[in-house]
Image (tube, grey):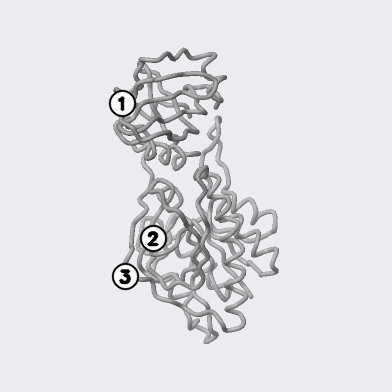
């Protein structure tokens, strides 16, 4: 089976690795253009492009796929590459570009030459219709969902509105950060897309419309959301810390100095004194009052510094009971 693959970050790379290991032929990869990265801000290929080049796969990097958009020449070149690949399906995972109708039509059930195709299959990191949109992993943790999962979806013109082809649930652990959960979901997504294509090859893949109830949208994470508002309950703030790890990182400040919080847990449910007030600071963690309960900060980072356990952090940053952390920290000034 010939598969066109469209994806960009590590989540997508894992799926491409599994497809190649399973023996699928991938004649074409679509991925985002190279971006500046690192301290030197040198152009860097996406994880998917790096893997594709290692396997000698043709790579296309259009800035847009809209034939009537800002980069029509790049879109037409991609259109020609897709047609030349004569693929049976397109697998899409965190690609980063919207697929116009012409792509869906080109990969649709009836190909122009008359052979049947499977269309565009998306690996979506949520239990649809829960958390349609850009940041389903972050939002599931932030909301306190007990479970998430991966849905293999038949793509249509809507935003994550297509029929469900395969779905598997995954428990969200109490200590899951977005980074940890991302890795488990990437592994699950890679396994499920191989399974879905193998079932489809035998003609046994069936489509189920998404329920009309339970639809939520996982909006893109904004840096401003990372500021810890100590007027919120400790349990809410603990989820926020986990949801925004590794990016953009939960943030607070003391006397104008930005601090990122990478690990924390909630204790108790009583109403503390002033929200944001440091109750204790020792090797076990920095205990901070919230609107309800105490948030214990156990891994922190100063601007320009390293991530440190609370004990090491306190050796270079004096915190004493009675000091008040700033609820209005500016994430843009926090440690990178």
Q: Callout 2: few (<14), some (14-19), or many (20+) C-alpha neighbours within 10 Å?
A: many
User: Pointer 2: what residue?
Assistant: 130
Tell me the quarter of the picture where residue 1 sits.
Answer: bottom right
Between the C-alphas of marks 2 and 1, the distance is: 32 Å
Q: Nearer the viewer, residue 25 or 207?
A: 207
**Which of the two discs, 2 and 1, sits closer to the camera?**
1
Measured in 3D between alpha carbons, the distance from the residue under mark 3 to the one under mark 1, in whole angstroms, is 40 Å
- Mark 2 and mark 1 lie on one chain; the one further toward the N terminus is 2
Label 2 close to label 1 by CB (< 8 Å) = no
Picture residue at 31% right of the left edge, 70% below the top: 212
Residue 161 % position (x, y):
37, 68
| Labels 2 & 3 near each other (Cβ < 8 A) | no
Q: On screen, 226 above or below 1? A: above
Sequence-wise first label, 2 or 3: 2
What secondary structure is marked by label 2? Answer: loop
Q: Earlier in the sequence, mark 3 or mark 1?
A: 3
| Residue drawn at (42%, 41%) of the image | 239
List x then y, in percent, for residue 255. 35, 15
Q: Which mark is nearer the camera, 3 or 1?
A: 1
Separation of marks 2 and 3 at Cα, in angstroms = 11 Å
Q: Identify the residue at image location x=50%, y=33%.
A: 263
Q: Is residue 65 left or right of residue 60?
A: left
Establish if 315 lies above or below 32. above
Q: Position of residue 310 (x, y in %)?
A: 53, 23
Relative to 211, say whether 252 is above or below.
Answer: above
Q: Where in the figure is residue 286, as x and y percent of width and height? A: 46, 23
Do the CB atoms of the residues marked 3 and 1 lie less than 8 Å apart? no
Question: In terms of depth relative to the viewer, which is nearer, 196 or 325?
Answer: 325
Q: SS class of the residue under badge 1?
A: loop
| Residue, disc 3 | 212
- Camera-side residue of 61 and 132: 132
Q: Which mark is residue 275?
A: 1
């Amino acid at each position: 089976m010939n598969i066109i693959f469209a994806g960009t970050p590590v989540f997508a790379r894992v799926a491409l690795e599994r497809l190649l290991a399973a023996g699928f032929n991938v004649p074409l990869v679509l991925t985002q253009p190279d971006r500046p990265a690192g301290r030197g801000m040198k152009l860097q290929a996406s994880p998917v492009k790096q893997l594709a080049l290692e396997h000698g796969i043709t790579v296309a990097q259009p800035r847009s796929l809209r034939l009537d958009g800002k980069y029509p020449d790049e879109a037409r070149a991609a259109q020609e590459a897709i047609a030349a690949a004569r693929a049976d399906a397109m697998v899409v995972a965190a690609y980063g570009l919207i697929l116009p109708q012409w792509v869906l039509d080109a990969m649709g059930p009836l190909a122009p030459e008359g052979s049947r195709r499977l269309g565009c299959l998306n690996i979506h990191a949520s239990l649809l219709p829960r958390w349609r949109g850009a940041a389903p992993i972050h939002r599931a943790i932030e909301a306190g969902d007990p479970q998430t999962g991966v849905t293999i979806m038949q793509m249509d013109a809507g935003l994550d509105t297509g029929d469900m082809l395969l779905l598997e649930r995954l428990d969200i652990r109490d200590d899951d950060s977005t980074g940890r959960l991302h890795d488990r979901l990437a592994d699950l997504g890679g396994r499920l897309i191989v399974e879905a294509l193998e079932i489809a090859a035998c003609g046994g893949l069936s489509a189920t419309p998404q329920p009309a109830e339970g639809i939520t949208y996982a909006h893109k994470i904004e840096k401003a959301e990372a500021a810890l508002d100590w007027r919120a309950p400790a349990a809410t703030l603990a989820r926020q810390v986990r949801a925004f790890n590794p990016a953009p990182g939960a943030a607070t400040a003391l006397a104008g100095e930005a601090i990122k919080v990478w690990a924390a847990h909630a204790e108790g449910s009583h109403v503390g004194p002033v929200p944001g007030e440091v109750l204790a600071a020792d090797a076990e963690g920095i205990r901070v009052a919230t609107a309800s309960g105490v948030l214990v900060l156990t891994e922190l980072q100063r601007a320009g510094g390293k991530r440190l356990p609370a004990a090491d952090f306190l050796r270079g940053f004096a915190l004493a009971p009675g000091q008040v952390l700033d609820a209005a920290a500016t994430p843009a000034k926090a440690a990178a």
